[in-house]
Amino acid sequence: MIDMNKGGRTTSWRFVRVRRVVGWKSEAYEDNAYEEVGTVSGITSCSIEEAQLTSLKVSGSIEYVDMPDLGDDLLRVYADMELDGEVESKCYGTFFVYSKSEQICEGSHVGTADLYSVLVLLEQRLLEGNYAVGAAYTANYLPVVSEMVYEVGLPLMLTPGGWEVAATKTWEVGTSFLEMANDIMELYGYGSLNVDVWGNVIAKPYQDPETAVATTVFSDTEEDVSDETIKREWDVHDTPNVVVVRSKLKDDSEVIGSAENADPNNPYSTAARGMRIVRFEEVEGLETKAQCQEKAKALLIEGMQSIERLTIGHAGKRFNAGDTVAVDYQRSGLSGKYSAYKRSVKATPDTESETTMRRTVKLYGNVAKS
């Protein structure tokens, strides 16, 4: 396997036509869900966008000259790499090709098209009536997700949940299969439905990036393929250091409790900043000042967090958006684990890429000022 953290490799890009197997409906997705039916010529450029905060997760675009019409077939994108005599083909995704726009001159078709992940089939499929989940499924909604995915003809890799949700839930007519499935995923503490590079739908529990193993490292050393320059975004200006909670009682009286970060060793406290940045919350069901104080403390800890974002340009590396990655920029003083939630890839000889990652920085304890 090629070390994709090293520079010097050569890459050529290959595009393959993929067909869904007619009548497929089985959990043995790896054997017969798709078949490759030949190469696709005429594609002159390709870019892929992996974005975990979007419903389709992966999209892209191509430019082409006289590319054949794929119809309902899919396009699979490969990078064929060579380094130090070692050869490897890496798949970057399997897509539907939609929204063609082209110019025709003397019989030649020159145009662009959009690429969409297979999750688009779940987005396009809408409920044709209200749908209630209960009875046999009251204790376990996950089979409903399997049924929806298989109904649109997609393979599913589902990590079983070890608990039950005892509730009946209804979705209204016109709701997309994708929205309904993601609602169910949220009930179980799963991430929203994802997709892998082969066109398999992925359903698995959410994992905190802090506890996950990093799949790759971004470094500012000369041996790494990451850019030396890194973009950092982090806004702590309006981080609260006081929270006030009010709860109204049945007799129209009220109780109020507050919490304050007055730690002089904390750079975001009232003592260190010399000002009070107050957050106010109305909360129902609290009956004593002590309860309001405890709630205020919990909200203060929650509020004293900031999202730190890094954006790094690099050649192709071995990871996908959604993975946990490590940063080791020693000369810049940046290190730690981050969730890589967005990546763009261009089909160039060095697999020109840019990744945006983030982590939650806790500001309640004693932290260094930055």
Image (cartoon, helix red, strand yellow):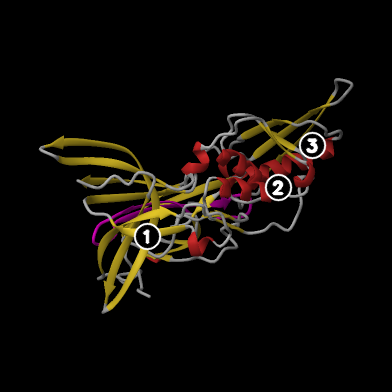
Q: Is residue 146 visible?
A: yes
Calculate the distance from the C-alpha at mark 2 to the C-alpha at mark 3: 36 Å
Question: Who comes first in sequence, dot 2 or dot 1?
Answer: 1
Question: Who comes first in sequence, dot 3 or dot 1?
Answer: 1
Q: Is residue 91 magenta?
A: no
Asked which secondary structure carries label 3, the reply is helix
Asked which secondary structure carries label 1, the reply is strand
Left or right: residue 24 compared with residue 46? right
Label 3 packing within 10 angstroms: few (<14), some (14-19), many (20+):
many
Q: Amino acid at mark 2?
A: Tyr
Q: Residue at x 26, y 79 (%)?
A: 85
Residue to which mark 2 is pinned: 141
- The mark lying in front, picked from 2 and 3, is 2
* Rendered image: mark on residue 36: 1
Q: Amino acid at mark 3?
A: Cys
Left or right: residue 21 compared with residue 68? right
* Rendered image: mark on residue 292: 3
